């Protein structure tokens, strides 16, 4: 079997998605997600201009060898653009292998370790009544766990709350930040949410890389009475050692890793058991192959999976995630934001979302087909993630 063609499809059915399609001389094809939010065309070029020529004529069954040759052979290692491109190749090859085997991918990864995949959804509100309504809406949709994000008094636009539109379409929106105001406000919000919804509902929160270790330690301690499922990305964790201080001072569970792209980003965090959940996406971590290895490394440290699943992971990347979630033993939870009808018209998917739980379906492969005609009707639209500024105008982590 040989790879005879590989094409990159950029489509924007409401938001941009980058998809790699690999075709073989047997007529079997596979899909991989290469979407890097706000930098989509860089990955499309990395694939089209540099990776596709290397794939033509090679054996699609040699997944490990292809992964190693793309990672080591480029000499320039790591980084989100490189690893998203490698991820797309890796997932497309797993899709092909599973189709050839006539099995859903999770069967090749060890088979089902559970009946279905537990998820969490997002609720946010500028005020408490808005937030309560959003939590109620998620409960009604069946979500068994809910991430709570809130506005902060005195700040106009904050991460995770409402659309925060850009002043100039096609350029980044500007959001506001004041760490002291946030630290004063957040424990009161969780106190109110617990009082409203009771002790049983698993609640999560994402601090989105904004705190110092000292601030994160204090916040974790102050949130302990409200029994969070996790506090996510409390510090910019490129400085892995910073988590030692956080860990010493709080038992609030910690989740980190959506911006990480190799196992080396996690080395200290995992081997010193400084976190409880690893958050990498299949799409940004180089694919199913390395993410499975990370989960296996994390397992003896009692660290569980929590694959990143916001709107900017395409249904292709999400499907690959759900197959992994089914198969690994140390599964924790899967983030699931859902997709619009327009996206579902472009990406036809076998995976299902019922009562707040995902199942990958039993279609051979990853179970997603790309409708290329529908994709072509939604051309790329330049878009950026917001930029975050303190009240005096200083840029802060977003
Ligand atoms: O901000 O995916 O946990 N989820 C998140 C996401 C990220 C976006 C960035 O592209 O933090 O909402
Ligand atoms: Co996050």
Image: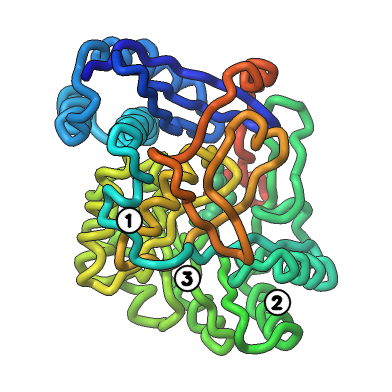
**Left or right of residue 301: residue 197:** right
User: Label for residue 239?
Assistant: 1
Compare marks 3 and 2 and give the one earlier in the sequence: 2
Q: Residue at x 38, y 35 (%)?
A: 80
Residue 293 in view in this figure:
yes
Q: Are marks 3 and 1 in contact (CB under 8 Å)?
A: no
Q: Say the numbered circle drawn on residue 75.
A: none
User: What residue is shown at x 20% (from left), y 60% (from top)?
Assistant: 297
Is residue 184 placed above or below 196 in the rendered structure?
above
Location of residue 77 in the rendering, given as x and y in whole percent from the top left corner: 23, 32
Which element type, helix, strand or loop, lies under badge 3? Answer: helix
- Count of numbered labels shown in the rendering: 3
Q: Is mark 2 within 8 Å of ligand 2?
A: no
Pick whichever, 254 or 99, lies toward us: 99
The answer to whether marks 2 and 1 mark residues whose Cβ atoms lie closer than 8 Å is no
Question: In this view, which residue lies farthest toward the right?
Answer: 129
Say which residue label 2 marks. 189
Whether label 3 touches label 2, CB < 8 Å:
no
Identify the element where label 1 is drawn.
Answer: loop
Q: Is residue 97 found left or right of 344 in the rendered image?
A: left
Alpha carbons under labels 3 and 2: distance apart: 17 Å
**271 or 62, nearer to the observer:** 62
Which residue is at a point 65% across and 53% down the rendered structure image? 159
Q: Report which quarter residue 83 is drawn in.
A: top left
Which quadrant of the rendered structure holds the N terminus?
A: top left
Q: Residue at x 62, y 46 (%)?
A: 388
Disc sitting over residue 216 in the figure: 3
Q: CA distance from mark 2 to mark 1?
A: 29 Å
Q: Is residue 191 above or below residue 14?
A: below
Q: Is residue 83 visible?
A: no
């Amino acid at each position: 079997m040989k790879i005879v063609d590989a094409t990159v499809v950029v489509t924007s059915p409401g938001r941009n998605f980058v998809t790699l399609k690999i075709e073989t001389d047997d007529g079997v094809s596979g899909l991989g997600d290469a979407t890097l939010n706000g930098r989509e065309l860089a990955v499309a070029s990395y694939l089209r201009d540099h990776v596709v020529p290397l794939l033509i004529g090679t054996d699609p069954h040699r997944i490990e060898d292809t992964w190693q040759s793309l990672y080591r052979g480029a000499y320039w290692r790591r980084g989100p653009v490189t690893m998203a491109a490698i991820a797309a190749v890796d997932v497309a090859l797993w899709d092909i292998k599973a189709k050839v085997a006539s099995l859903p991918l999770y069967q090749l990864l060890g088979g089902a370790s559970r009946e279905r995949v537990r998820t969490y959804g997002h609720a946010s509100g500028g005020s408490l009544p808005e937030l309560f309504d959003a939590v109620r809406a998620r409960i009604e949709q069946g979500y068994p766990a809910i991430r709570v994000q809130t506005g902060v008094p005195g700040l106009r636009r904050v991460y995770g709350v409402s659309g925060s539109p850009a002043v100039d379409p096609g350029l980044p929106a500007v959001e506001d930040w004041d760490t002291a105001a946030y630290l004063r406000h957040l424990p009161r919000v969780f106190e109110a949410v617990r009082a409203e919804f009771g002790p049983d509902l698993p609640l999560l929160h994402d601090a989105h890389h904004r705190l110092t270790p000292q601030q994160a330690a204090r916040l974790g301690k102050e949130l302990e009475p409200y029994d969070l499922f996790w506090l996510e990305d409390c510090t910019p964790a490129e400085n892995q050692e910073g988590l030692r201080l956080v860990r010493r001072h709080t038992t609030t569970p910690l989740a980190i890793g959506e911006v990480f792209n190799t196992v080396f980003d996690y080395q200290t965090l995992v081997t010193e058991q400084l976190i409880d959940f690893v958050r990498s996406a299949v799409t940004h971590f180089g694919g199913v192959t390395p993410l499975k290895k990370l989960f296996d490394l994390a397992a003896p440290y009692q660290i569980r999976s929590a694959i990143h699943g916001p709107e900017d992971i395409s249904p292709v990347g999400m499907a690959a995630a759900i197959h992994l979630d089914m198969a690994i033993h140390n599964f924790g939870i899967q983030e699931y934001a859902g997709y619009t009808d327009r996206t579902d018209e472009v990406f036809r998917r076998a995976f299902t979302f019922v009562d707040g739980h995902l199942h990958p379906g039993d279609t051979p492969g990853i179970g997603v087909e790309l409708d290329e005609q529908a994709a072509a009707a939604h051309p790329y639209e330049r878009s950026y993630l917001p930029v975050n500024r303190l009240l005096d105008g200083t840029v802060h982590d977003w």
